[in-house]
Image: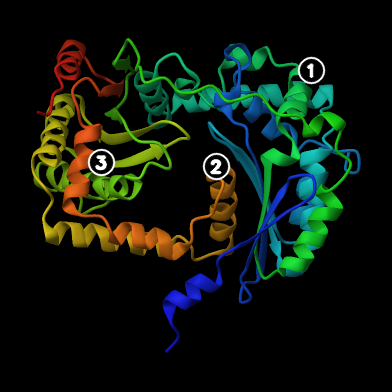
């Protein structure tokens, strides 16, 4: 019988650095039928000025809209889809990623198209104006969807007037202010070899990937591409002046979100934080799901999840409830948070959530795309790629005392924000609960 631990270790990625500083990560998965490529760029919305917020996201759109070699706006997608593949991109607060997935024998094409789109965009004025309308429609759609809107409100409430509290895509005014000069300057400032990680996973060979990377990414950069990029502004610990943000809408139910400022990405307590979340709202066996849905029938959907950045983080609790159940749901959440501070979790519970966390982690690495994005994202964000077994060892080492200690770090007086979107008319009662939040 094969050793599962050895099998996992055999898939650990390799890292090569080109002479210009661009890092190439390769995860060889011989049994895969795919090759997945992703270019991770170290710039996101928290690197932007408020007046042109949304630049990184705008540029993400534009890099699919024609290059010198493929001037037609549809040529980039046609090249990948014509090979049976797919492609897309995403922007977060701290990075931008462009990726494609093709049959493994089309790796050279995929590398050519990815490098071409990221490095040689035309940024045609006509396409910039056309895409502005598309992006504004995307912003309006997000505003119209209560689940997305409440997430923006809770980010604002938890972080206040700083980049981590702003919308990644910007708003209609900031997107309207973006010019071609802004986009070109953004590329010149941030799209530099030292800020790019190229991650490739699937049925590929390291030597071929590095050779292709050198061919497409190793030369042709402008001289300023090797200058230091601007430092990222640090997050402030302050939250919003308006800790309970309520947007009344004529809907069938309320979308409720609560957030507590939490730990940063590499905090030593990150494994304990993950298991704390599993206990609180990480699944259908969690305390919040059991109390709010199974025992009281207050909500169909309820749960929690942690988010971590370079120097900050937050724990979000979400629920969809009717107007008359918002305050009761908040009270139940407060009770469960208080229990995490006051009482260690039981051995039975910690064993269960640990197994769920480890199992979910392993299953999350079931495809080449998962390995590609894990390796690329971790190397860019953390400066290293944590081995699979080290992550699992981190979960195994967590004790009940660790979870309680993290709970006391996070669940504390004054560290709570709330947001509601829906037909909610008890503003004062919610604000009073948020203001007096004290689990001790």
Of labels 1 and 3, earlier in sequence is 1
Residue bearing the label numbered 3: 302
Residue closer to the observer: 156 or 405:
405
Residue 336 picture location, percent across and down: 13, 38
Callout 3 secondary element:
strand
Q: Distance between the Cα atoms at labels 2 and 3?
A: 30 Å
Callout 2 secondary element:
helix
Looking at the rendered image, the disc whose residue lies closer to the viewer, 1 or 3, is 1
Name which residue lies at 30% across and 44% down. Answer: 273
- Whether residues under marks 1 and 3 lie with C-beta atoms below 8 angstroms apart, the answer is no
- Whether residues under marks 2 and 3 lie with C-beta atoms below 8 angstroms apart, the answer is no
Dot 3, how many residues are within 10 Å of its Cα: few (below 14), some (14-19), or many (20+)?
A: many
Looking at the rendered image, the disc whose residue lies closer to the viewer, 2 or 3, is 2
Of labels 2 and 3, earlier in sequence is 3
Callout 1 secondary element:
helix
Residue 393 picture location, percent across and down: 35, 62
Q: In the image, is 193 to the left or to the right of 406? A: right
* Quadrant (top left/top right/bottom left/bottom right) for the N terminus: bottom left
Q: Distance between the Cα atoms at labels 1 and 3?
A: 44 Å
- Whether residues under marks 2 and 1 lie with C-beta atoms below 8 angstroms apart, the answer is no
Residue 194 visible to the viewer = yes
Q: In the image, is 78 to the left or to the right of 39? A: right
Dot 2, how many residues are within 10 Å of its Cα: few (below 14), some (14-19), or many (20+)?
A: some
Relative to 66, residue 250 above or below: above
Q: Quadrant of residue 2?
A: bottom left
Residue bearing the label numbered 1: 181
Residue bearing the label numbered 2: 381
Of labels 2 and 1, earlier in sequence is 1
């Amino acid at each position: 019988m094969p050793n599962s631990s050895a099998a996992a270790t055999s898939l650990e990625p390799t890292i090569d650095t080109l002479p210009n500083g661009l890092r190439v990560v390769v995860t060889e998965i011989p049994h895969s039928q795919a090759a997945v490529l992703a270019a991770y760029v170290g710039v996101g919305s928290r690197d932007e000025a408020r007046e042109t917020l949304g630049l990184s996201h705008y540029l993400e759109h534009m890099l699919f809209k024609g290059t010198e070699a493929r001037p037609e706006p549809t040529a980039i997608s046609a090249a990948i889809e014509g090979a049976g593949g797919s492609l897309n991109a995403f922007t977060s607060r701290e990075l931008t990623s462009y990726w494609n997935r093709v049959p493994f024998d089309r790796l050279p094409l995929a590398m050519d198209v990815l490098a071409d789109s990221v490095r040689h965009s035309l940024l045609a004025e006509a396409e910039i104006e056309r895409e502005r309308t598309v992006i504004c429609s995307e912003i309006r759609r997000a505003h119209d969807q209560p689940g997305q809107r409440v997430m923006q409100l809770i980010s604002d409430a938890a972080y206040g007037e700083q980049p981590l509290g702003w919308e990644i895509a910007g708003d209609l005014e900031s997107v309207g202010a973006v010019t071609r000069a802004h986009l070109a300057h953004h590329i010149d400032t941030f799209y530099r070899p030292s800020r790019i990680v190229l991650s490739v996973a699937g049925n590929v060979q390291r030597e071929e990937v590095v050779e292709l990377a050198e061919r497409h990414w190793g030369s042709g950069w402008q001289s300023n591409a090797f200058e230091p990029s601007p430092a990222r502004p640090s997050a402030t610990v302050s939250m919003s002046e308006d800790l309970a943000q309520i947007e009344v809408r004529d809907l069938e139910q309320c979308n409720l979100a609560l957030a507590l400022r939490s730990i940063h990405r590499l905090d030593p307590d990150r494994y304990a934080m993950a298991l704390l979340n599993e206990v609180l709202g990480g699944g259908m066996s969690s305390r919040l799901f059991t109390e709010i849905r199974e025992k009281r029938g207050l909500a169909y959907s309820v749960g929690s999840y942690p988010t971590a950045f370079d120097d900050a983080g937050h724990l979000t609790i979400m629920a969809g409830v009717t107007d008359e159940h918002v305050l009761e749901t908040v009270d139940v959440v407060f009770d469960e948070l208080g229990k995490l501070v006051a009482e260690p979790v039981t051995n039975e519970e910690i064993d269960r959530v640990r197994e769920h966390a480890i199992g979910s982690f392993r299953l999350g690495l079931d495809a080449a795309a998962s390995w590609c994005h894990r390796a690329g994202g971790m190397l860019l964000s953390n400066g290293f790629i944590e081995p699979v077994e080290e992550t699992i060892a981190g979960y195994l080492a967590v004790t009940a005392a660790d979870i309680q200690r993290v709970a006391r770090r996070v669940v504390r007086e004054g560290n709570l924000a709330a947001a509601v979107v829906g037909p909610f008319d008890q503003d004062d009662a919610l604000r009073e609960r948020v203001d007096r939040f004290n689990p001790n």
